[in-house]
Amino acid sequence: MRSLRTGSSLAALVTGAALLFTAPAAHAADSPLRDLAAARGKVIGTAVTGAKLTGTYGDIAGSQFSSLTPGNAMKWGTVEPTQGSFNWTEADQIVAFAQAHNQQVRGHTLVWHNQNPSWLTNGSWTPTQLSGLLQNHISTEVGRYKGKIAAWDVVNEPFNEDGTYRSTLWYDNLGADYIANALTWAHAADPGAKLYINDYNVEGVGAKSTALYNLVKDLKSRGVPIDGVGLQAHLVLGQVPATLQQNIQRFADLGVDVAITELDVRMALPADSAKLAQQAADFKSVVAACAAVTRCAGVTVWGFTDSDSWVPSTFPGYGAATPYDENYAPKPAYFGIAQALGGTTTTPPPPTGACSATYSVTSQWNTGFTGQVTIACSGASLSSWKANWTFGAGQKITQSWNATCAQSGTAVSCANAPYNGSVPDGSSVSFGFNGSWSGSNPVPTVTLG
Ligand code: 9MR
């Protein structure tokens, strides 16, 4: 039996009982998404979890995206768990990672009804005290990152579905002007940051987005510093609103920027090829709508991998909502994004089962580095393996563990150790090596054979 899939560098050769795969490493398109986006004057971002920014997750976050949004690290409950005692560890880490990778940071979020510290929500405050706490919070956090944040989601999710104000700690005690005040305080703390109001179910024209439109119009007429609106875009498969581009355009015409801030497209599990193709079309149409409007600054996905998504725990039975699968292989949705940004890579047939190898540099010093290759199988398995790659900049392997590696010129071939040849469906094995480098140390594409 022989099956060969081409067009994506993903080819599966099945011979008798043995499975031989060549599979893409993490970086799959001809140009990274961030380069495609930059060529169109757009930003492409992802929400991230600070602790995961190493290995393959870090490689993809750093190479494919031009903006990072801390998924949780900058929320009030995270940064001030006890009143007056701050924890900036994860937020600082994400900002440092972004700076090291020449990325923007989208600050998220300053005023919300969720993920507030319990000392705040359980306290009993007069409106004056509450207003003072909010001002202090905004001044402290925005001030800490002054000059390092491209845009802040200052106010998050202020509206109900019918366009009335959501009843929250803020609205109930301070009235609607908590929004104008929050923007004014944020502007005072960092006049260079773009200030946004961010909400969900405001992607198409409707009661909720019209309430947001009217609010922005009112704020602008009053001279309140408002630079943009964030359309979160937590979408359901096949349900991109038909009026998305029209809605983006009407905000642009009002004189504010627009950003798609939290894009994901969830589907009923299990995923199949038809759903993944629909998802690719959905991601493509959202990114294309942004690309078509000059004042749409860009698109951020809410997690780039299905292994780092809020969807499965919030919507049981739903998932697969992001552009990369749980093993960091790009899904058709990835190519949908790339195409909307002018990329030429065609959508690959969705893999029905594959083993793939991902290469990462886990540490690096002036002349040497430590690398790791992880071989992961999903819907397939291996009983033995060889991982092959070509070094592009004269790197040399000096030592390896959990595999036997041989290098001839630039070609490296690493075979499994006696104890780790078996990679059952749904599992992975890793091996490591030390090498030398000089000049540059680019990540090669690993093929399995
Ligand atoms: O992705 C975030 C998840 O890890 C948190 O548990 C959740 C708590 O509400 O918040 C998620 O992010 C939300 C974002 O901050 C605002 N818009 C909706 C997002 C998904 O819930």
Image: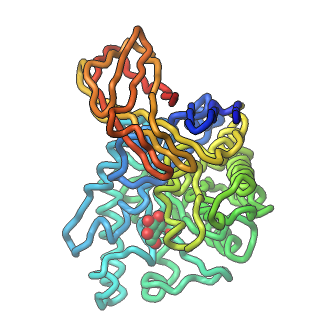
Q: Is residue 229 visible?
A: no
Position of residue 10 relative to residue 281, above or below, is: above
Which sits in the foreground, 194 or 168? Answer: 168
Which sits in the foreground, 89 or 169? Answer: 89
Q: In the displayed image of the protein, which residue is found farthest to the front? A: 16
Q: Position of residue 41 (x, y in %)?
A: 62, 37
Q: In the displayed image of the protein, which residue is found farthest to the right? A: 242
Q: Quadrant of residue 33?
A: top right
- What sort of colour scheme is used for the picture? rainbow
Position of residue 250 relative to residue 23, above or below, is: below
Q: In the displayed image of the protein, which residue is found farthest to the top? A: 409
Residue drawn 54% across the image and 49% down it: 378
Q: Is residue 242 left or right of residue 135?
A: right
Look at the image and tell me in which quarter the N terminus lies: top right
Residue drawn 70% across the image and 33% down it: 2
Q: Quadrant of residue 18?
A: top right
Q: Quadrant of residue 420?
A: top left
Q: Position of residue 288 (x, y in %)?
A: 72, 47
Residue drawn 29% across the image and 88% down it: 123
Q: Position of residue 393 (x, y in %)?
A: 41, 14
Q: How many marks?
A: 0
Residue drawn 56% across the image and 46% down it: 380
Q: Position of residue 336 (x, y in %)?
A: 69, 44
Q: Is residue 445 visible?
A: yes
